[in-house]
């Protein structure tokens, strides 16, 4: 489930107009992402197989503070948290009273983290980027990962409305965002407090 949460994130778009040149698309996308300082949103997640069958529907909330800070709270069907304090990634499952820790830098190939993190940590040139109005497609250049395509809808003012991960096998995970606001977020939201009753699975190696 952790791998699915890490790699699951963005939304399916029908191509209706000609794509913009790749180098221009990268600049446009980066400029829109730079307008994001912090935001909160509700999300609905839908996992859909290659035959368009719904495998899972879930919902939760997301807090982001650039760069490198986020709190991904899955509420249903199974509550869990994915929290970045800028260095450590905490994956916490309340029902198990267990948290697993990873170094954020070890996920430098993760497309979701690339969008909300320090640009120096990630390689934009590992992707071909195409734009269709507010929709952007990021396609990995290398074939050694399971991700076929990543899609994001982001407005000119930096508001993300949805995103999708599409795997090579045809399965995709769609996220629709709503009830967004750009209010100041308490920094405590991005730190995990390890109490005595929580089991630690230490993976920071």
Image (spheres, helix red, strand yellow):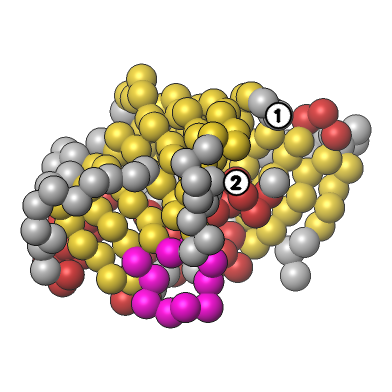
Determine the residue located farthest toward the top in the rendered image: 179
Q: Residues within 10 Å of mark 1 (few under 14, many from 20)?
A: few
- State yes or no: discs 2 and 1 in contact (Cβ < 8 Å): no
- Quadrant housing residue 191: top right
Residue 113 seen: no
Q: Nearer the viewer, residue 180 or 17?
A: 17
Q: Name the residue under label 2.
A: 5
Q: Nearer the viewer, residue 158 or 14?
A: 14
Q: Nearer the viewer, residue 181 or 17?
A: 17
Residue found at x 16% / y 62%: 25
Answer above or below: position of 23 versus 88: below
Answer above or below: position of 129 versus 201: below
Indicate left or right for 97 with 59 as reference.
Answer: right
Q: Position of residue 196 (x, y in %)?
A: 90, 35
Q: Mark 1 points at which residue?
A: 78
Magenta-span inclusion, residue 140: yes
Query: Which quadrant does the C terminus fall into?
Result: bottom right
Magenta-span inclusion, residue 24: no
Residue found at x 36% / y 20%: 179
> Which segment did they paint magenta?
139-148
Mark 2 vs mark 1, CA separation in Å: 12 Å
Q: Position of residue 30 (x, y in %)?
A: 23, 58
Secondary structure mostly seen in the magenta stretch? loop
Secondary structure beneath disc 1?
loop
- Kindly identify which numbered label has been placed on residue 16: none
Indicate left or right for 177 with 191 as reference.
Answer: left
Residue 146 seen: yes
């Amino acid at each position: 489930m952790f791998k699915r949460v890490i790699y699951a994130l963005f939304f399916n778009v029908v191509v209706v107009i000609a794509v913009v040149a790749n180098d221009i698309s990268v600049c446009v996308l980066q400029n829109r992402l730079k307008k994001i300082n912090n935001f909160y949103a509700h999300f609905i997640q839908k996992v859909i197989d290659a035959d368009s069958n719904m495998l899972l529907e879930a919902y939760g909330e997301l807090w982001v503070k650039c760069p490198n800070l986020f709190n991904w709270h899955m509420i249903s069907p199974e509550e869990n948290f994915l929290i970045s304090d800028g260095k450590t990634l905490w994956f916490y499952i309340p029902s198990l009273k267990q948290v697993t820790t990873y170094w954020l830098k070890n996920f430098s190939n993760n497309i979701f983290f690339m969008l909300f993190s320090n640009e120096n940590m990630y390689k934009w040139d590992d992707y071909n980027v195409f734009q269709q109005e507010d929709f952007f497609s990021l396609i990995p250049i290398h074939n050694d990962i399971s991700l076929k395509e990543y899609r994001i809808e982001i407005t000119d003012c930096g508001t993300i409305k949805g995103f999708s991960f599409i795997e090579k096998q045809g399965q995709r995970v769609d996220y629709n965002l709503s009830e967004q606001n750009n209010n100041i977020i308490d920094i405590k939201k991005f730190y995990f407090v390890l109490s005595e009753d929580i089991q630690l699975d230490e993976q920071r190696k």
